[in-house]
Structures are given as structure tokens and as C-alpha cells.
Image (cartoon, rainbow, N blue to C red):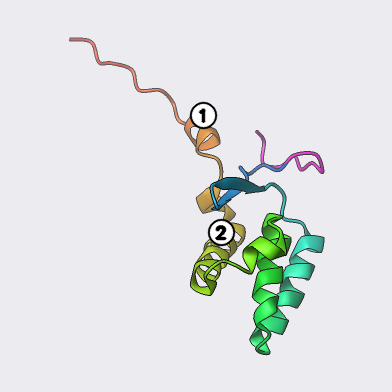
Amino acid sequence: MDSNKLSTEKSLYEPIKIEVNGKLYLINKVTPKLLKKVAEHERQALRGDPDAIVQQFSVLTGVEAAIVEELDIRDLTAALMRITKEIMRPDETIGKAEKNASKPEAKPSPQ
């Protein structure tokens, strides 16, 4: 896919995957609107509101807050850090299929 062609339909990047209690959740698109919500919850978390981490994770992943509240806060923090890394460094997380498609196939050398 040409990286200069942007679309509101589909991202150039593969979804970020997160598994909670055996169920897979996908973060398909990271929009400015989504990041504003996440940033607000982050500000609240920095002020000491423990529920803000739950809300931040829930907004990003779509996992219900009632489920997130039962998770270990250390697991939540680690998952948020991984998700943030994938959002902030998209070149490291671009779909492997797209990267591999741009590499020429190795041909066996004649003997």
C-alpha cells in the first residue's frame, strides 16, 4: 500500500492487539479524537485518580471498564506502555506483510 494515500476507511498499519481474559481486542484506528480522550484520562491519572487508568485503557481498547477494574494495575500500566510505544513509533510496528512485500524474493543461485 502506498504510504502517501491516506484513508478514513482503513489505516496503513495493522491493528494493535490486546488480549484480556482470553478475548482478543483490536485497536484499529488511533485518531486525534481518541488520543484527546486518552490524554485527558492520563492527566487525571497523574493527579492521582486510579480510575483514570481504567478509563484510559477502556477507551483505547474497547474493553468494558467493569472488566478492566478487575485487572492488576501493573498489567494495565505495562499494556498501556506497549500500546503507547506502538502508537508513537508506527514505523516499528507497520504490518510485517507490507514490509516483506517490498523485499525482493531470494532466488537460488545456479550451481
The C terminus - image quarter: top left
Tell me which corner region of the image, top left, top right, bottom left or bottom right, holds residue 38.
bottom right
Q: Residue furthest top?
A: 111
Is disc 1 surrounded by few (<14), some (14 to 19) or many (20+) residues within 10 Å? few
Residue at (73% x, 76% y) in the render: 41
Residue at (79% x, 41% y) in the render: 7
Q: Nearer the viewer, residue 20 or 92?
A: 20
Magenta stretch prevailing secondary structure: loop
Residue at (63% x, 44% y) in the render: 13
The N terminus - image quarter: top right
Q: Residue furthest left?
A: 111
Instruction: Residue 23: give x, y in percent of width and height.
Output: 59, 46
The range drawn in magenta is: 1-10
Q: Nearer the viewer, residue 93 or 106?
A: 93
> Which three-letter amino acid code belongs to the residue tagged 2?
Arg
Instruction: Residue 72: give x, y in percent of width and height.
Output: 52, 70
Instruction: Residue 107: give x, y in percent of width and height.
Output: 33, 17
In the displayed structure, would residue 16 be above or below residue 33?
above
Q: Is residue 49 left or right of residue 7?
A: left
Judging by the rendered image, the residue that carries numbered circle 1 is 101
Residue at (56% x, 57% y) in the render: 86
Q: Tell whether position 14 is magenta.
A: no
Under tag 2, what secondary structure? loop
Judging by the rendered image, the residue that carries numbered circle 2 is 89
> Which three-letter amino acid code belongs to the residue tagged 1?
Ala
* Mark 1 → mark 2, Cα distance in angstroms: 20 Å
In the displayed structure, would residue 94 be above or below residue 43?
above
